[in-house]
Image: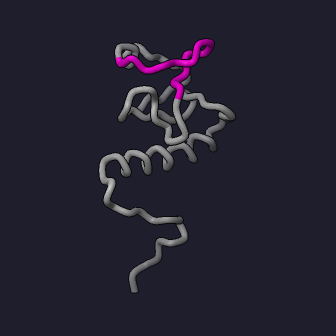
Amino acid sequence: MVSYGFTSDHKTVDAWGIDLETERHLFKVDTTMQTSEPGIYAIGDGVTYPGKQALIATAFGEAPIAVNAIMQELYPTRRGPAHSSSIRPVK
């Protein structure tokens, strides 16, 4: 689920039982961007964790972290690139 906009609205996910931060009602995530509900990940302005910087650039970095964690969950035996520079054109 992708939510674009300037105002957070959790009406759709309130029934999912995800832990929210008390003051601003942001989704609490771990270092893999997973919420308190297994298999549900969140990134961007709607999440919080220790040291979170509310910047667009931060969300761009959170996306690959979440995708990598999801891929590991769905395909634990597959190995992805270790580093972006390890992706080379096939000769």
Answer whether residue 20 is magenta in the image.
yes
Image quadrant holding the C terminus, namely bottom left
Residue in the picture at 52% in, 31% down = 29
Place residue 50 in its image quadrant. Answer: top right
Front one among 1 and 52: 52
Most common secondary structure along the magenta stretch = loop
Residue in the picture at 55% in, 16% down = 25
Residue in the picture at 45% in, 65% down = 81
* Residue 69 percent coordinates (x, y): 43, 47
Place residue 3 in its image quadrant. Answer: top left
* Residue 40 percent coordinates (x, y): 38, 32
Query: How many labels, in total?
Result: 0
* Residue 75 percent coordinates (x, y): 30, 53
Image quadrant holding the N terminus, namely top left
Residue in the picture at 43% in, 78% down = 89
Answer whether residue 41 is magenta in the image.
no
Magenta residues (range): 16-28
